[in-house]
């Protein structure tokens, strides 16, 4: 699965890469965000739903870190699960959001 190369969260820029499957299994993780290292690492295994949920999960950690919000698994995991199902179940919503985000970027120029 091809991941985005970079994700910008506020003032932080994260390189996105696959997490080695052996490391992920050995550490019992699906992904991680390295705030100081500017990396989001996502396990390359599982179905599309698992990879998307992991990416959303790590992005939310980045958002909560960037904006000084409480950043715990108890908060991030349900939010990631909810957003992942919203994205899955509402493809027209994603198209709308992308269109509006492009307009916002154009307005910034």
Image: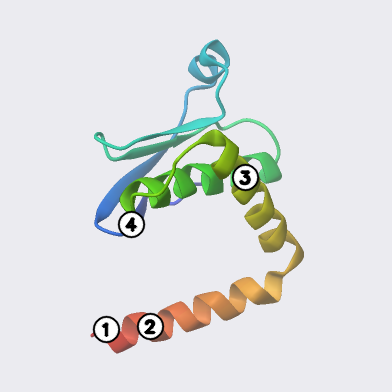
| Residue that carries the numbered disc 2 in the rendered image | 104
| Residue that carries the numbered disc 4 in the rendered image | 8
The image shows residue 34 at horizontal and vertical percentages of 34, 33
Q: Residues within 10 Å of mark 4 (few under 14, many from 20)?
A: few
Q: Is residue 1 visible?
A: no
The image shows residue 7 at horizontal and vertical percentages of 37, 53
Q: Quadrant of residue 57?
A: top right
Helix, strand or loop status at disc 4: strand
The colouring scheme, among rainbow, by chain, secondary structure or one colour, is: rainbow
Q: Which mark is residue 108?
A: 1
Furthest residue toward front: 70
Spatial separation of the CA atoms under disc 1 and disc 3: 30 Å
Q: Earlier in the sequence, mark 4 or mark 1?
A: 4
Q: Residues within 10 Å of mark 1 (few under 14, many from 20)?
A: few
Furthest residue toward top: 26
Spatial separation of the CA atoms under disc 2 and disc 4: 15 Å
In the rendered image, the vertical position of residue 105 relative to residue 14, given as above or below: below
Q: Residues within 10 Å of mark 2 (few under 14, many from 20)?
A: few
Q: Quadrant of residue 50?
A: top right
In the rendered image, the vertical position of residue 107 relative to residue 19, given as above or below: below
Are the residues tagged 4 and 3 within 8 Å (C-beta)? no
Helix, strand or loop status at disc 3: helix
């Amino acid at each position: 699965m091809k991941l985005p190369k970079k994700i910008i969260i506020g003032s932080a820029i994260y390189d996105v890469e696959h997490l080695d499957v052996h490391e992920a299994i050995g550490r019992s993780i699906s992904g991680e965000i390295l705030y100081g290292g500017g990396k989001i690492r996502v396990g390359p295994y599982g179905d599309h739903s698992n990879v998307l949920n992991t990416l959303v999960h790590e992005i939310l950690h980045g958002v909560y870190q960037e904006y000084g919000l409480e950043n715990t698994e108890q908060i991030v995991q349900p939010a990631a699960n909810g957003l992942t199902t919203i994205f899955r179940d509402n493809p027209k919503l994603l198209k709308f959001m992308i269109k509006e985000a492009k307009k916002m970027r154009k307005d910034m120029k």
